[in-house]
Image (cartoon, rainbow, N blue to C red):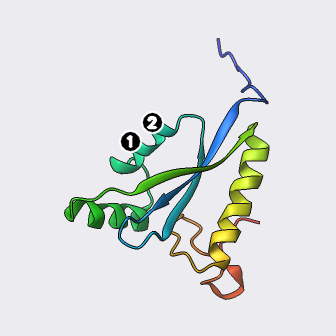
Amino acid sequence: MNFFVPTDPYEPYDIYILVDPRDNAVYYIGITTNVVNRYKQHLKKKDCNALKTAWIQDLQKQGLLPQLHIIERVKGLKPAKERERYWFHFYGKQGSPLTNIHGNPYDRPKNIGVVS
């Protein structure tokens, strides 16, 4: 028997950034309900984001790790995704070298592949 347990619509989500300690540039923006576990996943390369993985491996070769900064906390998945999108565009406009799978929307012609 399958049981569907809906997520709490008021569950807190952290919107966070991963920052390169060499130049303080923002390389990744994400959301999570457990920032410690999510950070460990990034470090263990537990996803299919080759660009982010290469960046983290480059840092690790130099004995460094990305810095994680929580930039906002919101309640609920939908508001969290909306705020993540806001910050994605905010840092994209600033020219941050984003490694999110969607990349920097301001580096691509006609915003190909951008979350809207």
Q: Is residue 19 left or right of residue 109?
A: left
Q: Quadrant of residue 102?
A: bottom right
| C-alpha separation, residue under disc 2 versus residue under disc 1 | 5 Å
Return the x and y of residue 38 as percentages of the image width and height.
47, 41
Q: Is residue 105 visible?
A: no
Give the number of the disc on residue 37: 2
Picture coordinates of residue 15, whole percent (x, y): 63, 49
Who's the residue at 77% across and 53% down the image? 82
Pick whichever, 67 or 46, lies toward us: 67
Total marks drawn?
2
Name the image quarter holding residue 7: top right
Most foreground residue, 115 or 11: 11
Q: Amino acid at mark 2?
A: Asn
Q: Residue at x 77, y 66 (%)?
A: 116
Say which quadrant the N terminus sits in. Answer: top right
**Which residue position is annotated with label 1?**
40
Secondary structure, mark 2, is: helix
Vertical placement of 109 versus 29: above or below? Answer: below
| Label 1 neighbour load within 10 Å: few <14, some 14-19, many 20+ | few
**Can residue 13 be seen?**
yes
Instruction: Report crowding for label 2: few under 14, some 14 to 19, many 20 or more residues within 10 A (C-alpha).
Output: few
**Residues tagged 2 and 1 counted as in contact (Cβ below 8 A):** yes
The picture places residue 107, in percent across and down from the top left corner, at 60, 84
95 sits to left or right of 74? left
Amino acid carrying mark 1 in the image: Lys
